[in-house]
Image: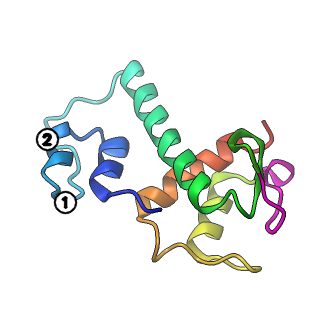
């Protein structure tokens, strides 16, 4: 399942509800947008984690084991045992390999970042 790009823009860039509702582009915050506060940063991080968790559940859990996601797949590597860092997950999700399909044409860059962060933060927990 692929999430609409406006939803990803909202979660990752702190875009306003109006931007997401207009169905427009993946607009970046304007220069006048204030930097997120500590509370805002944790809210944004939670939103990214939620997107990553949903993407993992619908696209990865059937093959991979990841306790945080309640996934017990036996086809791909056990991510809890492997505990890959975010860069490694991003590379694998983007390009595929070793039997795993590439998701570069399936997920947006923001979605790849979200699922990569989720896996890296959750593996081995």
Image coordinates of residue 122 in percent, x first then y, are 69, 41
- Residue placed under numbered mark 1 in the picture: 25
Instruction: Nearest to the eye among marks 1 and 2: give it.
Output: 2
Sort mark 1 into few (<14), some (14-19) or many (20+) by Cα contacts within 10 Å: few
- Residue placed under numbered mark 2 in the picture: 18
Residue at image position (63%, 78%) is 101
Residue at image position (28%, 30%) is 35
Q: Quadrant of the C terminus?
A: top right
- Which tag, 1 or 2, sits closer to the chain's start? 2
In the picture, measured across the screen, residue 28 lies left or right of residue 117, that is left
Marks 1/2: CA distance? 12 Å
Q: Is 79 a magenta residue?
A: yes
Q: Where, by quadrant of the figure, is residue 91 drawn?
A: bottom right
Q: Is 61 a magenta residue?
A: no
Under circle 1, the secondary element is: loop
Image coordinates of residue 87 in percent, x first then y, are 63, 58
Image coordinates of residue 100 in percent, x first then y, are 70, 75
Label count reads: 2
Residue 74 circle label: none
Under circle 2, the secondary element is: helix
The residue range painted magenta reads 72-83
């Amino acid at each position: 399942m692929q999430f609409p790009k406006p939803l990803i823009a909202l979660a990752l860039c702190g875009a306003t509800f109006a931007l997401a509702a207009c169905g427009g582009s993946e607009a970046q915050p304007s220069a006048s947008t204030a930097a997120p506060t500590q509370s805002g940063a944790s809210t944004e991080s939670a939103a990214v984690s939620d997107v990553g968790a949903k993407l993992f559940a619908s696209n990865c859990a059937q093959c991979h084991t990841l306790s945080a996601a309640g996934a017990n797949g036996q086809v791909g590597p056990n991510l809890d045992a492997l505990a890959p860092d975010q860069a490694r997950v991003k590379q694998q999700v983007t390009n595929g390999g070793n039997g795993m399909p590439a998701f570069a044409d399936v997920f947006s860059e923001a979605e790849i970042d979200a699922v990569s962060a989720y896996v890296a933060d959750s593996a081995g927990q």
